[in-house]
Image (spheres, rainbow, N blue to C red):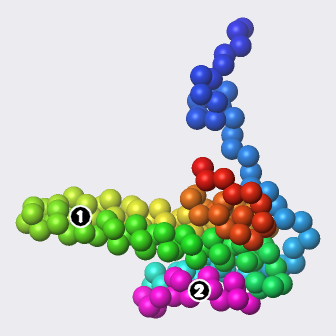
Amino acid sequence: MTDRQDPAPGRGGIGAVPPEPAPVEQGLSDEERTWGMFAHLFVFLGYIGLPFANWIGPAIPYFMYKDKSRFVRFHALQSFAFQCMVWILGSVLAVPIVLIGVFTAGIGWLLLFPVLVAAWIGTVVYVVILGLKANKGELAEYAVVGAWARQKVYQEDWKPV
Protein backbone atom coordinates (compact mmCIF):
# COMPACT_ATOMS: atom_id res chain seq x y z
CA MET A 1 0.00 0.00 0.00
CA THR A 2 1.36 3.46 -0.85
CA ASP A 3 0.89 6.72 0.99
CA ARG A 4 -1.23 9.09 -1.02
CA GLN A 5 -0.93 12.79 -0.45
CA ASP A 6 -3.81 15.09 -1.18
CA PRO A 7 -2.45 17.74 -3.53
CA ALA A 8 -4.49 20.44 -1.80
CA PRO A 9 -4.97 19.67 1.91
CA GLY A 10 -8.13 21.08 3.39
CA ARG A 11 -10.00 21.20 0.07
CA GLY A 12 -11.81 17.89 0.33
CA GLY A 13 -10.92 14.57 -1.18
CA ILE A 14 -8.69 11.79 0.09
CA GLY A 15 -6.58 12.80 3.05
CA ALA A 16 -8.28 16.19 3.39
CA VAL A 17 -7.75 17.95 6.69
CA PRO A 18 -11.09 18.91 8.24
CA PRO A 19 -11.44 22.52 9.38
CA GLU A 20 -10.62 23.24 13.00
CA PRO A 21 -13.69 23.59 15.20
CA ALA A 22 -14.46 27.01 16.60
CA PRO A 23 -12.91 27.65 20.01
CA VAL A 24 -15.21 27.30 22.99
CA GLU A 25 -15.18 29.97 25.67
CA GLN A 26 -14.96 28.41 29.12
CA GLY A 27 -16.96 29.45 32.17
CA LEU A 28 -20.02 30.75 30.36
CA SER A 29 -23.35 30.76 32.11
CA ASP A 30 -26.44 29.31 30.45
CA GLU A 31 -27.78 32.86 30.26
CA GLU A 32 -24.75 34.07 28.28
CA ARG A 33 -24.98 31.18 25.84
CA THR A 34 -28.71 31.79 25.39
CA TRP A 35 -28.28 35.50 24.74
CA GLY A 36 -25.41 34.76 22.38
CA MET A 37 -27.84 32.59 20.43
CA PHE A 38 -30.57 35.25 20.57
CA ALA A 39 -28.13 37.75 19.09
CA HIS A 40 -28.26 35.69 15.91
CA LEU A 41 -31.85 34.49 15.98
CA PHE A 42 -33.47 37.88 16.70
CA VAL A 43 -32.76 38.79 13.07
CA PHE A 44 -35.68 36.56 12.09
CA LEU A 45 -38.00 39.26 13.40
CA GLY A 46 -36.81 41.34 10.46
CA TYR A 47 -37.17 38.42 8.07
CA ILE A 48 -40.85 38.00 8.98
CA GLY A 49 -41.63 41.65 8.35
CA LEU A 50 -40.86 43.79 11.41
CA PRO A 51 -39.10 46.86 9.99
CA PHE A 52 -35.41 47.12 10.91
CA ALA A 53 -35.68 44.21 13.37
CA ASN A 54 -32.78 42.39 11.73
CA TRP A 55 -30.59 45.27 12.96
CA ILE A 56 -32.41 46.08 16.18
CA GLY A 57 -32.53 42.39 17.18
CA PRO A 58 -28.74 41.99 17.62
CA ALA A 59 -28.54 45.42 19.25
CA ILE A 60 -30.72 44.29 22.17
CA PRO A 61 -28.30 41.68 23.57
CA TYR A 62 -25.34 43.88 22.61
CA PHE A 63 -26.46 46.77 24.79
CA MET A 64 -27.75 44.48 27.56
CA TYR A 65 -24.41 42.62 27.84
CA LYS A 66 -21.77 44.94 26.39
CA ASP A 67 -20.20 45.51 29.80
CA LYS A 68 -21.08 42.10 31.27
CA SER A 69 -20.09 39.48 28.69
CA ARG A 70 -17.54 39.61 25.91
CA PHE A 71 -19.10 36.41 24.51
CA VAL A 72 -22.56 37.97 24.04
CA ARG A 73 -21.02 41.24 22.83
CA PHE A 74 -18.99 39.33 20.19
CA HIS A 75 -21.97 37.39 18.85
CA ALA A 76 -24.24 40.44 18.82
CA LEU A 77 -21.64 42.63 17.09
CA GLN A 78 -20.89 40.12 14.38
CA SER A 79 -24.59 39.37 13.85
CA PHE A 80 -25.28 43.08 13.41
CA ALA A 81 -22.31 43.48 11.04
CA PHE A 82 -23.40 40.44 9.02
CA GLN A 83 -26.93 41.83 8.62
CA CYS A 84 -25.47 45.16 7.47
CA MET A 85 -23.28 43.32 4.96
CA VAL A 86 -26.28 41.35 3.64
CA TRP A 87 -28.30 44.56 3.31
CA ILE A 88 -25.50 46.38 1.46
CA LEU A 89 -24.91 43.43 -0.86
CA GLY A 90 -28.64 43.13 -1.55
CA SER A 91 -28.90 46.85 -2.25
CA VAL A 92 -25.95 46.79 -4.65
CA LEU A 93 -27.31 43.74 -6.49
CA ALA A 94 -30.84 45.15 -6.70
CA VAL A 95 -29.92 47.60 -9.47
CA PRO A 96 -28.59 45.03 -11.94
CA ILE A 97 -31.40 42.62 -11.06
CA VAL A 98 -34.03 45.26 -11.84
CA LEU A 99 -32.25 46.22 -15.08
CA ILE A 100 -32.00 42.59 -16.18
CA GLY A 101 -35.71 42.15 -15.54
CA VAL A 102 -36.63 45.32 -17.42
CA PHE A 103 -34.44 44.61 -20.45
CA THR A 104 -35.57 41.00 -20.73
CA ALA A 105 -39.29 41.77 -20.31
CA GLY A 106 -39.39 39.90 -17.01
CA ILE A 107 -37.75 36.69 -18.21
CA GLY A 108 -34.54 37.62 -16.37
CA TRP A 109 -36.50 37.87 -13.14
CA LEU A 110 -37.86 34.38 -13.65
CA LEU A 111 -34.33 33.08 -14.12
CA LEU A 112 -32.90 35.02 -11.18
CA PHE A 113 -35.71 34.24 -8.76
CA PRO A 114 -34.43 30.75 -7.85
CA VAL A 115 -30.94 32.20 -7.27
CA LEU A 116 -32.33 34.86 -4.95
CA VAL A 117 -34.42 32.32 -3.04
CA ALA A 118 -31.37 30.06 -2.67
CA ALA A 119 -29.29 33.01 -1.40
CA TRP A 120 -32.00 33.91 1.13
CA ILE A 121 -32.28 30.30 2.32
CA GLY A 122 -28.48 30.13 2.61
CA THR A 123 -28.48 33.26 4.75
CA VAL A 124 -31.19 31.86 7.01
CA VAL A 125 -29.35 28.55 7.42
CA TYR A 126 -26.08 30.39 8.14
CA VAL A 127 -27.76 32.48 10.86
CA VAL A 128 -29.32 29.38 12.46
CA ILE A 129 -26.00 27.48 12.44
CA LEU A 130 -24.15 30.38 14.09
CA GLY A 131 -26.96 30.76 16.64
CA LEU A 132 -26.75 27.08 17.58
CA LYS A 133 -22.96 27.28 17.86
CA ALA A 134 -23.31 30.31 20.14
CA ASN A 135 -25.69 28.30 22.30
CA LYS A 136 -22.95 25.66 22.65
CA GLY A 137 -20.51 28.35 23.81
CA GLU A 138 -18.49 28.38 20.58
CA LEU A 139 -16.83 31.50 19.23
CA ALA A 140 -17.89 30.68 15.67
CA GLU A 141 -17.44 33.52 13.17
CA TYR A 142 -19.35 34.72 10.16
CA ALA A 143 -17.26 34.96 7.02
CA VAL A 144 -15.86 38.43 6.35
CA VAL A 145 -17.15 40.17 9.51
CA GLY A 146 -16.41 37.57 12.21
CA ALA A 147 -12.68 38.21 12.50
CA TRP A 148 -13.29 41.96 12.70
CA ALA A 149 -15.87 41.50 15.48
CA ARG A 150 -13.54 39.21 17.41
CA GLN A 151 -10.74 41.78 17.16
CA LYS A 152 -13.05 44.56 18.37
CA VAL A 153 -14.33 42.57 21.34
CA TYR A 154 -11.30 40.50 22.34
CA GLN A 155 -8.66 43.03 21.21
CA GLU A 156 -6.76 40.47 19.15
CA ASP A 157 -4.72 41.33 16.10
CA TRP A 158 -7.10 41.47 13.17
CA LYS A 159 -5.84 40.21 9.85
CA PRO A 160 -8.28 40.24 6.96
CA VAL A 161 -8.53 36.89 5.23
Q: Secondary structure at mark 2?
A: helix
Residue type, label 2: Gly
Q: Earlier in the sequence, mark 1 or mark 2?
A: 2
Q: Residue at x 69, y 44 (%)?
A: 19
**To which residue does mark 2 refer?**
57
Circles 1 and 2 in contact, beta carbons < 8 Å:
no
Q: Is residue 142 above or below residue 48?
A: above
**Toward the viewer: 154 or 90?**
154
Residue type, label 1: Pro
Residue 55: within the magenta?
yes
Q: Taken as a whole, is the magenta stretch helix, strand or loop?
A: helix
Judge the density around disc 2: few (<14), some (14-19), many (≥20) Cα neighbours within 10 Å. many
User: Does residue 142 appear to the left or right of 94 in the view shown?
Assistant: right
Q: Secondary structure at mark 1?
A: helix
Q: Is residue 160 above or below residue 137?
A: above
**Toward the viewer: 59 or 120?**
59
Q: Is residue 108 visible?
A: yes
Residue 15: within the magenta?
no
* Range shown magenta: 49-64
Residue 55, position as x, y percentages in the image = 53, 83
Q: Residue at x 59, y 28 (%)?
A: 8
